[in-house]
Image: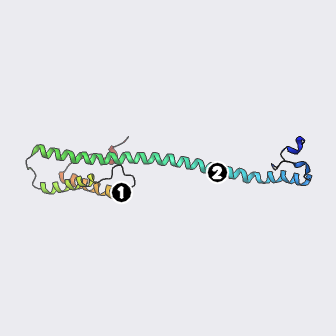
Amino acid sequence: ETPAATAPDYDGSVGGNERKKGRRDEGIFDCVLNMEEEIRERGWQKGFEDGRTKGLEEGRSLGENQGKKTAMEMGFYLGFVTMLESLEKADGRNHNQNKRSKQGKKSQLAKLLKGYPFGESNASNLSEIQAKIRAKFRALQSQLQANAPSTESSLSF
């Protein structure tokens, strides 16, 4: 075979010597005419892949940050309840006239925190549980007339 017979034609096929000159020229124009569509398709594909990668990275980062904030907030509530229980055990006296009501709110909050699905990212009612915990904490905080710092603004990483 001669080198011309095995060299690729403009359309990528081999053996163009036996083709007519008109068909060969048509292959050149097809390539030029389809170039814009091919470039657009490659660009779209590359952009889609880049966007998917970037979206996964941003989603992972956002989830990690929100998870840290939520863990700090729930840890704060748990620490608050634990501190109250320790103070009550150490004091042992009944100074408060409505201690029973405070005990109820504290035990309800402790129960909610104990049932909190730490480490379970697939809990479907996580927002609902968090809202209940926040509400119980605010009620207990109000009843105790305690001014604990706002967990929303004071906690940061």
| Front residue (pair 83, 9) | 9
Contact between labelled residues 2 and 1, with CB atoms less than 8 Å apart:
no
Name the residue at 34% across, 43% down. 155
Name the residue at 68% across, 53% down. 41
Name the spot of residue 14 as percent of width and height, x first: 84, 48
Viewer can see residue 120: yes
Question: Residue beneath label 2, please?
Answer: 45
Q: Quadrant of the C terminus?
A: top left
Name the spot of residue 109 as percent of width and height, x first: 23, 54
SS at circle 2: helix
Name the spot of residue 61 as percent of width and height, x first: 46, 45
Name the residue at 54% across, 46% down. 54
Name the residue at 88% across, 49% down. 16
Viewer can see residue 150: no
Q: Quadrant of the N terminus?
A: top right
Q: Quadrant of residue 72?
A: top left
How busy is the neighbourhood of tag 2: few (under 14 within 10 Å), some, or many (20 plus)?
Answer: few
Name the spot of residue 85 as percent of width and height, x first: 17, 47
Count the labels in the image. 2
The label on residue 127 is 1
Q: Amino acid at mark 2?
A: Gln
How busy is the neighbourhood of tag 1: few (under 14 within 10 Å), some, or many (20 plus)?
Answer: few
SS at circle 1: helix
Q: Vertically, is 41 above or below 86?
A: below
Q: Earlier in the sequence, mark 1 or mark 2?
A: 2
Q: Does residue 32 appear left or right of residue 81 in this picture?
A: right
| Front residue (pair 129, 146) | 129
> Which residue lies most toward the front here?
1
Q: Amino acid at mark 1?
A: Ser
Q: Does residue 60 appear left or right of residue 53 in this picture?
A: left
Q: How is the image coloured?
A: rainbow
Q: Does residue 149 appear left or right of residue 55 in this picture?
A: left
